[in-house]
Amino acid sequence: MTLHEMDLETKKMRGHLDHLFILIVFGDLVGLPLLPPYYSMRLLPYVVPSIKKWKRSLLRERDLTDFVAGDIG
């Protein structure tokens, strides 16, 4: 059970880092340009499969219970 909890934590951290990477590279899709478009276009073919899921999770309305639920378990 200890390894299962550690596995869940590492998956959660990887998800947060993936969202942060996509936000930095493709932030102009949501109105937050950080990198010049040249670099974004070079990385676009690698990120296209996950853009729809990323935008949905980024723009999802969150509640206080969403943050608390992650800390209880």
Image (cartoon, rainbow, N blue to C red):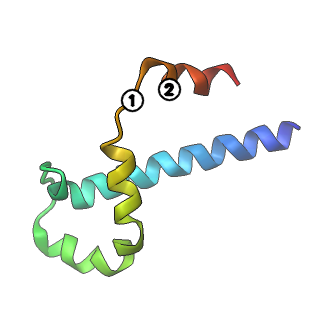
Label number found at residue 52: none
Picture coordinates of residue 59, whole percent (x, y): 30, 43
Between the residue at mark 2 and the residue at mark 1, the CA separation in whole angstroms equals 6 Å
Where does residue 44 sit, x and y in percent of width and height? 28, 76
Structural crowding at the residue carrying mark 1, measured as other residues with C-alpha within 10 Å and reported as few (<14), some (14–19) or many (≥20): few
Kindly identify the residue that appears in the image at 33 percent across and 58 percent down: 22
Q: Could you tell me if the residues under marks 2 and 1 are in contact, i.e. CB atoms within 8 Å?
A: yes
Q: Number of labelled discs?
A: 2
Query: Which mark, by number, is residue 66?
Result: 2
Q: Position of residue 54 (x, y in %)?
A: 37, 55
Q: Quadrant of residue 47?
A: bottom left
Q: Residue drawn at (66%, 40%), measured in percent from left and top? A: 9
Q: Which residue is drawn at the image coordinates 24% and 79% (left, top)? A: 42
**In which quadrant is the C terminus drawn?**
top right
Give the label on residue 62, or none: 1
| Along the line of sight, the residue nearer the viewer: 60 or 42 | 60
Residue type at the position of mark 1 = Arg
Q: Secondary structure at mark 1?
A: loop
Q: Is residue 36 above or below residue 73?
A: below
Q: Is residue 66 above or below residue 42?
A: above
SS for dot 2:
helix
Q: Mark 2, residues whose alpha carbon is within 10 Å: few (<14), some, or many (≥20)?
A: few
Q: Quadrant of the N terminus?
A: top right
Q: Which three-letter amino acid code belongs to the residue tagged 2?
A: Asp
Would residue 52 appear left or right of 7 to someone viewing this image?
A: left
**Residue 58 location, quadrant:** top left
Q: Is 73 above or below relative to 19?
A: above
Give the camera-side residue of 67 and 44. 67
In the rendered structure, the answer to whether residue 54 lies left or right of residue 6 reads left
